[in-house]
Image (cartoon, rainbow, N blue to C red):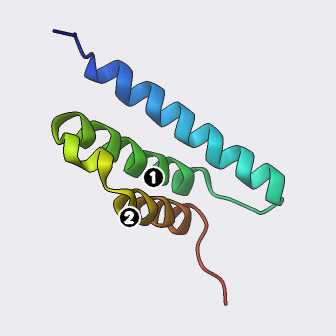
Amino acid sequence: MYDVYLDIIIIENLIINYTILHITTMILKTPYKWYRLLLSSALGCLYCVLSIYISRLLTIMILKVILSLCMVLLAFPYKS
């Protein structure tokens, strides 16, 4: 049996997701708002925490794609 420290998983996942989104803004040279990146990172973190308890979420590829699209749309709003 393994010990899972939920606070460590949340903090690490939040930092990594935020860093990836921030690097994306630097590469694309787009303006961003820090709270949108943080909210999008929190969505990815929520998926990670839920996948610990519901292991079937890890195997559904379409759910991962939909979540990734939601994270991107949340971090970078759609412009016409």
Amino acid type, callout 1: Leu
Residue nearer the viewer, 37 or 61: 61
Q: Check disc 1: other Cα within 10 Å, few if <14, some if 14-19, many if 20+.
A: some
Residue 8's label in the rendered image is none
Looking at the image, residue 12 sits to the left or right of residue 30; the answer is: left
Q: Quadrant of residue 60?
A: bottom left
**Residue placed at 45% from the left, 52% from the top?**
39
- Quadrant containing the C terminus is bottom right
Give the residue pinned by disc 2. 62
Residue 27 on image: x %, y %: 82, 52
**Residue placed at 37% from the left, 19% from the top?**
8
Residue 39's label in the rendered image is 1
Residue 40 on image: x %, y %: 47, 54
Amino acid type, callout 2: Ile
Classify 64 as above or below 58.
Answer: below
Looking at the image, residue 52 sits to the left or right of residue 11; the answer is: left
Classify 3 as above or below 44.
Answer: above
Q: Earlier in the sequence, mark 2 or mark 1?
A: 1
- Quadrant containing the N terminus is top left
Looking at the image, residue 16 sits to the left or right of residue 11; the answer is: right
**Helix, strand or loop under label 1:** helix
**Residue placed at 57% from the left, 41% from the top?**
18
Residue nearer the viewer, 77 or 68: 68
Residue 73 on image: x %, y %: 53, 69
Cα gap from disc 2 to disc 1, whole angstroms: 22 Å
Looking at the image, residue 68 sits to the left or right of residue 43; the answer is: right
Classify 42 as above or below 63.
Answer: above
Q: In which quarter of the image is residue 23?
A: top right
Residue 35 on image: x %, y %: 53, 52
